[in-house]
Image (cartoon, rainbow, N blue to C red):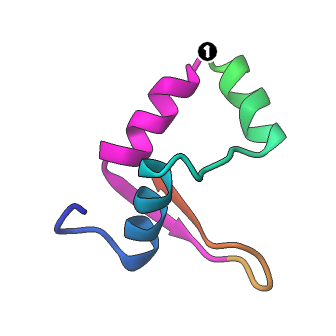
Amino acid sequence: MAQDDSYQASYIRQKAAKGEIDFREHAMENMGIRKIWLDDALAAVTSGKEIEIQAFEDKDVRVLFQ
């Protein structure tokens, strides 16, 4: 866990390390359009910088990594 991580980012990084993370279909489509490889997206989750937390009422919390 990076020292600057929120608890949300830390949780997501732990899930990714265990292979328990999944990407929604629209995220996969957007990655394809932007030519972002799945391996690169996973690397951003596991070791990238946390840049934003998006909280939506009655939905999952999302963390953006770079």
Mark 1: few, some, or many residues within 10 Å (few <14, many ≥20)? few
Q: Is residue 53 magenta?
A: yes
The answer to whether 35 is drawn above or below residue 30 in the figure is above
Q: In the rendered image, is residue 48 in sight?
A: no
Q: Could you tell me how many numbered marks the image carries?
A: 1
Rendered location of residue 19, percent (x, y): 53, 46
The residue depicted at 21 percent of the width and 68 percent of the height is: 4
Outermost residue, left side: 3
Rendered location of residue 9, percent (x, y): 42, 66
The residue depicted at 56 percent of the width and 19 percent of the height is: 37
Rendered location of residue 40, percent (x, y): 46, 26
Which element is circle 1 on? loop
Per the image, the residue denoted by label 1 is: 35
Q: Nearer the viewer, residue 14 or 31?
A: 14
Rendered location of residue 10, percent (x, y): 37, 68
Q: Quadrant of residue 61?
A: bottom right
Tell me: 28 left or right of 18.
Answer: right
Tell me: 60 left or right of 50.
Answer: right
Magenta residue span: 35-55
